[in-house]
Structures are given as C-alpha cells and as structure tokens.
Image: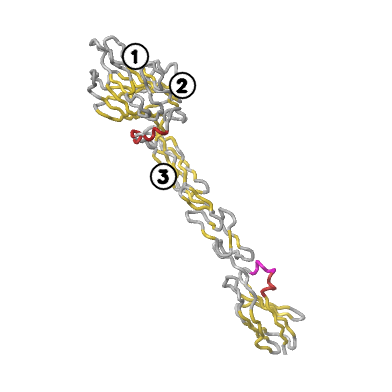
Amino acid sequence: VAPDDADPDCSDIPIRNVTFPNERILLDSQNYESTLLVGAEGENRTWLTIDYDGGGVGRPGAAGFVDSWYEGNQGTQCLHRINVCATLIPGGTSSFQSNWLVTQYINISEPGISQLRINVTFTSNLVCSSQQCAQQQTFEVQTYETNEPDETNKGNISYYSYAGVRLIHTAEEGATTDSESFAVSSSGLYLAIWDQGSCTVINRIVIFYNICPYQVLNKTIYPETVAPQGSFDPDKNVIATCIDNASPTSSNSLSLRCRLLGVWIGSASCQCNAGYEANGTVCQACQEGTYKSVAGDSECNGCPNNSYSASPGAVSCQCLSGYYRTPQEGVAVNCTAPPSSPQNLTNTSVTKTNISISWLEPTYNGGRTDLYYVISIKSSTNIIEYSTGHTNYKLMGLTPFTTYEIQVMARNGVSDQDNANDNTRTVTITVTTH
C-alpha cells in the first residue's frame, strides 16, 4: 500500500483488478488517496520529480515543452498515470535528458527480508505529439537504501548515490509489464526512476515480497510466512495451529513447508474437540441438551433418554435423578431405573420340606431387559437368599412345621446404585410347612 496514504476506495478502480496473490505489497502507485501523486519540479507532492538537464518550461528555445515526469490524469483520485515524453535539448546537441522520479520512503517492517520484487506496468510510444521522441525507449529503476527516512539526501541524485540496483527496461512500442527482483540489506529504501529521453506512461508500480499467505483450511490456521527469497533457498518448515476448540488429527498433521513464490506445500488438518462441532470455519460448543463425546467431524447428538446436559460444550449427558447407567455402559446409552416390585406373589405348593412359589413380572422394568429376582427365605433361626431369572421357584430342604417369611425382590443392572429403595421393590408372603 502507499504508506500513510492508503485509501480503501482505491481498491475498486478497474486497474486494481490486476492482483498480486501471495505477495506483501510495500508500495503500490494505484493506492494513494491524493488526487496528485507527482507534480512539476519543486512542487510539494508525495513523490519528488527532478529535471537535472535544466530543461522544461522556460528553457530558451523550448517554450511549452515539459521534460520532467508529470501526472497525465490531473485531479483523478487513485488513477495515477505518470508520464514523461522528453526530447533532445534543442540546438542539435547530443546531450541526453536526465529526468528523475523519486518515491517516498518505503519501510520494510518485516525483519530478515533480503530480496524484493518490483512490477512496472508501462506504455512506450515511438511517436509523441507536438515533439520528437528520442529513439532510446529506455528508463532505469534504481534504489537508495537507508535504515530510516532521509528526506535531506533522497534528492541527491547521482549515478553513485542511487547505485543500488540498476534495472534497465528497454520497451517496445505498446503496453507491457516488467518484473524484476533485487537484493536489499537495509530496513528501508527510496525508489528512483531515471528517464534519459523516452516517451513513457507508467500505469502502475508495485514493490513487494513473496509470502505464503495466511489462511484457514481444514480447521487449521496457516500463518503468514515470508517465503524463501532465492531460487536456491530451501523450503521453510512451518508449524500450523488449530482453530479455537480444535486439536490435531495426528501427531504430524500440523507440519507444512513454505516454498519460493509463496506456495504452501503439504496439508495441515485439525478436528473439533469433544463437546464441539464444526460450523463453517469455527468449532462451536454443543448446545444445551446435546453432547459430543469424542473429537472429530461428527455433529453433536441429542442427549440419550432420561439424561440432560445443563451447559454448552458437554462431552456427555448426566442421568436424571433416579436413573442410572452401569459402569460398562457408555455415554450414548439411555439412562435407566431399577424395576418396580413383582406382582401377585403366591405359594403354589407346600409340603413338609418344600415350598413352591410363583409371581408375575413387575409392571415397570426400568427400561432394561436384564431383569432378575432375589428370593429371601427367613425363619426364626436364619435367612437364606437365592436368585433366579424366572418367575417361579421351589424352596427345598426346609424344616417341617416351620413358618417362613418369603420375600421376592425385582432387580436389574442398575439396582445396586439405588439400594436405599429396595423395600419398595419387594413383595412378602408367609408360609408354614406341614
């Protein structure tokens, strides 16, 4: 962007449709909010113009001629087309033009930058109206490096003060874009364009360096990374990060490489944590009444029967009061309850030493199928317990002429978690052997 002078409205103009992906732009001549970027020599404009050959308006024999750089779209915001169309100094001398255009200070804020690139989009004309163009259709781009702005010396133009990079563009007639790279060793620079007698319109100047761009993909954040800057530089190893509430899909799923020209190599991936589900590029908490027990791309599920989640981001649902799960049952299993008491307990046969009993199943099994019964036979001297999965049982080896209290209690897999209420699940009869 144009430092300290950028205008977001400039991004909508047609010429800005030519974008520079994977690049961090330090200067773009089509992103200035001022209506005039350059002016006549000596005017206080953003960019400096210098006419070193002494020509221009007011030179004897050259009335009406403007040899230095000027802006051909006077008063049009954002569309800065910078022109020069010089001629040899009148009188037939072979002296050449020397017209300079100097940008403002370009700050390189990112440490470790050793190479920049410049794109210049320009048009050269072999015929100029009202004057004869020089045959040499050439201009140079040079740099003056300095670690801090140097307004005093930036206009001290000479072959040696701007010795930096000497990029020569020999243009054929018509529009073209030239791209060059150049080394830098300072934290900033001035850019100078030196015209020696061309007829040129510069439509756009962009200075940039390559980056592997910031992006969010597969729930993973690829950090903006300065790309390797030389053809022989190795790829940069980069570790991506997961978005909030996500974790890597594997131990090496965050490893990436940033390659020359800002190309990502490899694919990083993360997954939403337990208690969170994907919603576009974010992992959002499961809503109340839902849960998600494991990390992954699955959605949150509604709570199983007789359970609830009271807060967002639940990894399981708690059983309602009076409902339980066995230790072996997972969070996706419905919560269940102990059964009610057996029905219609009776003795079907009595002898001196045997008593046969039967009963009906409880009216409520608690939502389970693992129903069984505990039979307790109590005399004045002892208590014996038996268990069965049937609804009848024969008690043998009893003492003749003895009264027994017989209890049958219904139980299932979660009854042990609610022993305090066993008496509500028990029926009793009294039988005497004879």
Q: How far apart are marks 3 and 2 (CA)?
A: 40 Å
Q: Distance between the residues labelled 1 and 2?
A: 23 Å
Circle number at residue 52: 1
- Crowding at dot 1, Cα within 10 Å, few <14 / some 14-19 / many 20+, comes out as some
The amino acid on which the numbered mark 2 sits, given as a three-letter code, is Pro
Q: Earlier in the sequence, mark 3 or mark 2?
A: 2
Magenta highlight on residue 82: no
Q: Quadrant of residue 106?
A: top left
- Crowding at dot 3, Cα within 10 Å, few <14 / some 14-19 / many 20+, comes out as few
In what quadrant of the picture does the C terminus appear? bottom right
Q: In which quarter of the image is residue 59?
A: top left
Residue 173 on image: x %, y %: 24, 26
Q: Is residue 22 above or below residue 429?
A: above
The amino acid on which the numbered mark 3 sits, given as a three-letter code, is Gly
Query: Helix, strand or loop at disc 2?
Result: loop
Marks 2 and 3: in contact by CB < 8 Å?
A: no
Circle number at residue 149: 2
Residue 321 on image: x %, y %: 64, 64
